[in-house]
Image (cartoon, rainbow, N blue to C red):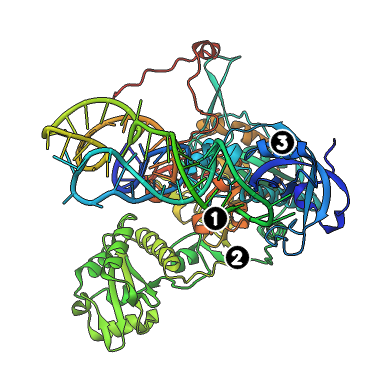
RNA sequence: GGAGCCGUAGUUCAGUCGGUUAGAACGCUGGCCUGUCAAGCCAGAGGUCGCGGGUUCGAGCCCCGUCGGCUCCGCCA
């Protein structure tokens, strides 16, 4: 019989109907005379009653032999449950099915874990992902992902974007992440690479007159994994022609309002904007969590001449001293402070100085190096109140920012300063185009080499590359980067100059990016866009804390931290014949070099 | 490339100072039970302590290696 209803949708209004439902046995409760089955499908649970008297002996016999995760076809009558027998915990709890016929559609081995367990090992879940995905939480996550994707498509379509697919087999270009390689059988010894992002293809589409493009694009990078990083992830990738930065940001704000709204999370544009320089100064990060204060305070000028060698020498050497005021940080134990010190060492800080503000004065081992007036000035500038602890890092600016920025976030969560219900969207703008490359001594693009420098920086592009600010912006949410974009270069001469600055002469640029330069030479519109991390967005929509996003929870079939798929059991070796077809040989594992 | 945590029953875990027969909960199997809904009661089965080596009279426990999972740094334009 054809399915007439989904399990989770039956209600008192269906009472009296004979229905056919199909699904998995979620649980079975055998009372000897009567057996209750909870039947589960995507919509939820429904109680099936197998009663040899009210139903049929045959149905009761099948129910008796059924086990967890058997797939059943149940035909029966919808009835109201008796007085006091309702189950308010499930939406179908007012009704039940008196089974007339039960058919086993598929038997099932005992599942390796119970679906309603609170704690299931990640390894088990990945190994048996097909069972893990049956759990309501995972079904919900996939539903939220789908709805968010639909919202994005609907909004962008309404804004006259075209969804266009771009190739998965691409040309290798330098820079960026390590590529996944795909051998080309037809031209042995040559390779395609899988896209790290559709960046160059979407810029090409702008030159092709598509005006507005978007794609839910899979992006592949052969780099080490993290909880928030998989070898393949999905971006809402979009690009717009004949626009300036403001129009792009407004469009993305509209998109995010719709996408977050699709999951019932109300946000409103316009989002606040902050320059990169301000963000680094106040938060020590280019992705600040603005849900709480504890901003960084510079006290370099106050301690430049004090007897404390650590501070004085750092400042004399061109460094700085900054601190954060930790509210009620006085509760931090000695061990806590040791842990925090060890924490900041991971990010290059040599130590962590502290001053406790107490009712009857200050307490710190460094007070003896600081004149009283300086002590007071520091406390005053940092807004220290009794009970607070002031924490300081002295180092070069990049280390100070990184160490204190991360410390701030850690403490913000540890001390419960973060309002987890808030969604703070923020634009960070005016990123530098380049950053120093300690490996080569030269410079390297902060994002990618296709972003347009601010007009006033064009003159100093070659003379002061590190000072060049670009029309580059990140979308930040609760301290997590959701996306990154820019106005692109569409002038081949400017593109060549930027490539030159990162060490690529004209010949090399033509070889590596010749097609892009050619695209520009035949007439490209001013354009720009963004790539938004769809997995991260969905994770936040599913209620994850931005700091601890685990995108494996919103990806149907994720990889482990070493890039393995435990369900498929890949990657695997490839047999010789298959390798021979693409003229490849695997080198033996050696302990060389 | 580096650092750390973990690996014991089907699952989640406990396992004292290195000491006799490795435990619990849930699940599973069988029995009882006509209103449960994480059903209940009774009984039972279930272990290469990831793998390999070493130390020791004796190793789940200590050491070395290895495999796997997780986290972080580097990396990820």
Q: Position of residue A468 (x, y in %)?
A: 50, 55
Marks 3 and 1: which is nearer the front?
Answer: 3
Helix, strand or loop at mark 3: helix
**Which numbered dot is residue A62?**
3
Report whether A54 appears left or right of A252. right
Residue bearing mark 1: A481
**Of the image marks 3 and 1, the number of the one nearer the N terminus:** 3
* N-term-proximal mark, 2 vs 1: 2
Residue at left offset 33%, top offset 80%: A378
Chain for numbered disc 1: A
Q: Position of residue A72 (x, y in %)?
A: 73, 37
Looking at the image, residue A177 sits to the left or right of residue A92; the answer is left
> Residue A416: x percent and y percent?
46, 70
Is residue A337 in sight in this rendering?
A: yes
Name the chain under label 2: A
Say the numbered circle drawn on residue A208.
none
Which disc, if any, is residue A423? 2
């Amino acid at each position: 019989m054809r399915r007439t209803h989904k399990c989770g949708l039956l209600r008192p209004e269906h009472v009296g109907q004979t229905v056919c439902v199909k699904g998995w046995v979620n649980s079975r409760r055998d009372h000897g005379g009567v057996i209750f089955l909870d039947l589960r499908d995507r919509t939820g649970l429904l109680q099936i009653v197998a009663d040899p008297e009210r139903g049929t002996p045959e149905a009761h016999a099948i129910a008796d032999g059924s086990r967890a995760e058997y797939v059943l076809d149940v035909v029966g009558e919808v009835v109201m449950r008796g007085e006091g027998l309702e189950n308010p915990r499930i939406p179908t709890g007012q009704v039940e099915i008196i089974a007339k016929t039960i058919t086993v559609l598929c038997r099932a081995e005992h599942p390796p874990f119970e679906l309603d367990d609170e704690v299931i090992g990640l390894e088990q879940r990945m190994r048996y992902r097909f069972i893990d995905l049956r759990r309501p939480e995972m079904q919900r996550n996939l539903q939220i992902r789908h709805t968010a994707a639909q919202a994005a498509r609907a909004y962008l379509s309404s804004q006259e974007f075209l969804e266009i697919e771009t190739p998965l087999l691409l040309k290798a270009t330098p820079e960026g992440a390590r590529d996944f390689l795909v051998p080309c059988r037809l031209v042995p010894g040559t390779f395609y690479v899988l896209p790290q992002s559709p960046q160059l293809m979407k810029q090409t589409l702008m030159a092709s007159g598509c005006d507005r493009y978007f794609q839910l694009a899979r992006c592949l990078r052969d780099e080490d994994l993290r909880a928030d990083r998989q070898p393949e992830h999905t971006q809402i990738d979009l690009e717009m022609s004949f626009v300036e930065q403001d129009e792009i940001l407004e469009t993305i704000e509209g998109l995010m309002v719709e996408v977050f709204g699709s999951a019932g999370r109300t946000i409103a544009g316009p989002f606040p904007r902050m320059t990169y320089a301000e963000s680094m100064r106040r938060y020590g990060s280019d992705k600040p969590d603005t849900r709480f204060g504890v901003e960084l305070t510079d006290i370099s000028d106050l301690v430049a001449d004090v007897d404390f060698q650590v501070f004085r020498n750092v400042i004399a050497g061109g460094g700085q001293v900054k601190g954060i005021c930790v509210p009620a940080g006085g509760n931090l134990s000695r061990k806590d402070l040791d842990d925090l010190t060890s924490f900041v060492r991971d990010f290059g800080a040599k130590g962590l100085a502290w001053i406790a503000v107490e009712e009857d004065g200050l307490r710190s081992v460094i007070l003896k190096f600081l004149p009283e007036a300086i002590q007071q000035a520091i406390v005053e500038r940092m807004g220290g109140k009794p009970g607070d602890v002031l924490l300081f890092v002295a180092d070069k600016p990049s280390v100070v920012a990184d160490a204190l920025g991360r410390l701030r976030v850690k403490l913000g969560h540890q001390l419960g300063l973060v309002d987890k219900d808030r969604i703070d969207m923020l634009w960070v703008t005016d990123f530098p185009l380049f950053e120093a490359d300690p490996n080569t001594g030269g410079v390297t693009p902060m994002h990618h080499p296709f972003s347009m420098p601010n007009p006033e920086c064009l003159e100093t592009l070659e003379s002061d590359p590190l000072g060049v600010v670009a029309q580059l912006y990140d979308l930040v949410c609760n301290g997590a980067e959701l996306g990154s974009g820019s106005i692109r270069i569409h002038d081949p001469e400017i593109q060549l100059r930027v490539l030159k600055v990162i060490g690529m002469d004209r010949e090399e640029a033509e070889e590596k990016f010749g097609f892009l330069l050619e695209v520009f030479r035949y007439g490209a519109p001013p354009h720009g866009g963004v790539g938004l991390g769809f997995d991260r967005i969905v994770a936040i929509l599913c209620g994850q804390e931005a700091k601890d996003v685990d995108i494996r929870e919103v990806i149907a079939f994720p990889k482990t931290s070493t890039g393995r798929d435990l369900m498929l059991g890949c990657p695997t070796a490839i047999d010789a014949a298959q390798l021979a077809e693409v003229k490849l040989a695997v080198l033996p594992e050696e302990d060389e070099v």
